[in-house]
Image: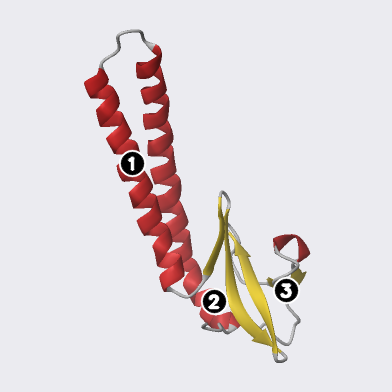
Amino acid sequence: MKHFSVEEAQACLPELEKIFALCSEIRGKAQARVEHLKRLESVPGGDPAHAAIDRSQVQFLAQCLEHALKGIDEMGALLKGIDPGLVDFPHLMDGEEVLLCWQEGEKAITHYHSEDDGFAGRKPLPRKTLKH
């Protein structure tokens, strides 16, 4: 498993912002298709061809979402949530493995937590760890 320095994790943030913006767009399109599909299916004697098209579009959008999120795994980071985006970066702090954590919208890596504590147990990084 790759261990990130704070600087390496920080360098991933622009790409993570792009990934989560794309995911938000894809989820919006999928939601619209699902709602349209529900309306089609609620009409007695509805058009099965249009419903089939909507179902295939939803499936395609799900694959697009999966592909976009794969970029997080490929960079060595750990996806923890998509709404909002939550990502952890394995890190060694004083010889102990911790997870640097980032939430969509944050401009910097400033917190960490143990694997057991999770996001709810995040703590500010010690000043010595933050390089300005």
The amino acid type found where label 1 is placed reads: Gln
Residue at 63% across / 68% down in the picture?
101
Residue 38: where, in percent of width, then height? 41, 22
Q: Are marks 2 and 3 in contact (CB under 8 Å)?
A: no
The amino acid type found where label 3 is placed reads: Ser
Res 80 label = none
Mark 3 or 1, which is nearer the eye?
Answer: 1
Q: Is residue 24 above or below residue 104?
A: above
Name the N-terminal-most of marks 2 and 3.
2
Residue at 65% across / 74% down in the picture?
99
> Which quarter of the figure is the C terminus placed in?
bottom right
Report crowding for label 2: few under 14, some 14 to 19, many 20 or more residues within 10 A (C-alpha): many
Q: Residue furthest left?
A: 49
The amino acid type found where label 2 is placed reads: Ala
Q: Are marks 3 and 1 in contact (CB under 8 Å)?
A: no
Q: Is residue 68 left or right of residue 51?
A: right
Res 9 label = 2
Q: Is residue 68 above or below residue 46?
A: below
Q: Is residue 132 visible to the viewer in this orientation of the structure?
A: no
Which residue has dot 3 on it? 114
